[in-house]
Amino acid sequence: MRTRTLLLLAVLCGLAILVAGSVQLLRLGGDGPGAGDLGVGDTASAGDMTVTVESAAETDGFMKVEVLLGGVDDESGVDGFRLVVPGRALVPLAAAQAGTDACAAVTTAEQRCTLVFGTAATTGSARVLLLRRGEDQRRWVLA
């Protein structure tokens, strides 16, 4: 083959790779950042549990997230919740530490309770409530 033909084939292969990469980039970027994120007031199911985040407020070093949850009898159902803050993920305080309206166990009947997280030692203002249950994961952007 002549040099001119090889150069032409190399340019065509490069263009094909560029077009394929552009298509893949558009395909992946079409959802946009945070497309699966939920907000306060949104309801989602993770596994067999249904959760609605009704409100979220941070005062005096504690983040209190009021939720409506149910759908399954599980004494350790709240163990799947985490509050993601810059640099780490916080576990909810136990019901004995958090007060009388704190979430303890999940039941099939919907119940309103509060998840309490200690945020006094955290920096930054980003707050994301994360629920992992089985193979499902749901995220609520709180701040």
Image (tube, grey):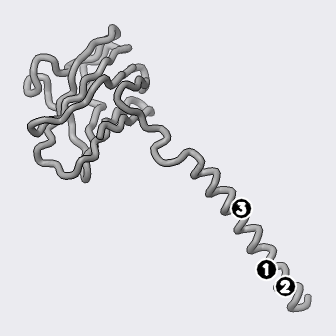
In the displayed orientation, state which residue is furthest to the right.
1
Residue 87: where, in percent of width, then height?
25, 53
Looking at the image, is mark 3 or mark 2 nearer the viewer? 3
Q: Hey, which quadrant is residue 81 in on the image?
A: top left
Amino acid identity at mark 3: Ala
Q: Residue at x 14, y 38 (%)?
A: 118
Label drawn at residue 20:
3
Mark 2 lies on a secondary structure that is helix
CB-based contact (under 8 Å), mark 2 and mark 1:
yes
Q: Residue at x 32, y 11 (%)?
A: 110
Q: Nearer the viewer, residue 41 or 89?
A: 41
Residue 63: where, in percent of width, then height?
18, 35
Going by the image, does 85 lie left or right of 10?
left
Mark 1 lies on a secondary structure that is helix
CA distance for labels 3 and 2? 21 Å
Residue 123: where, in percent of width, then height?
18, 52
Which residue is tagged 2? Answer: 6
Q: Nearer the viewer, residue 51 or 142?
A: 142
* 111, above or below 114, in the image: above
Q: Hey, which quadrant is residue 96 in on the image?
A: top left
CB-based contact (under 8 Å), mark 3 and mark 1:
no
Mark 3 lies on a secondary structure that is helix
Label drawn at residue 139:
none
Going by the image, does 20 lie left or right of 131?
right
* 16, above or below 37, in the image: below
Q: Nearer the viewer, residue 134 or 107?
A: 107
Q: How many marks?
A: 3
Label drawn at residue 10:
1
Q: Residue at x 36, y 25 (%)?
A: 41
Amino acid identity at mark 1: Ala
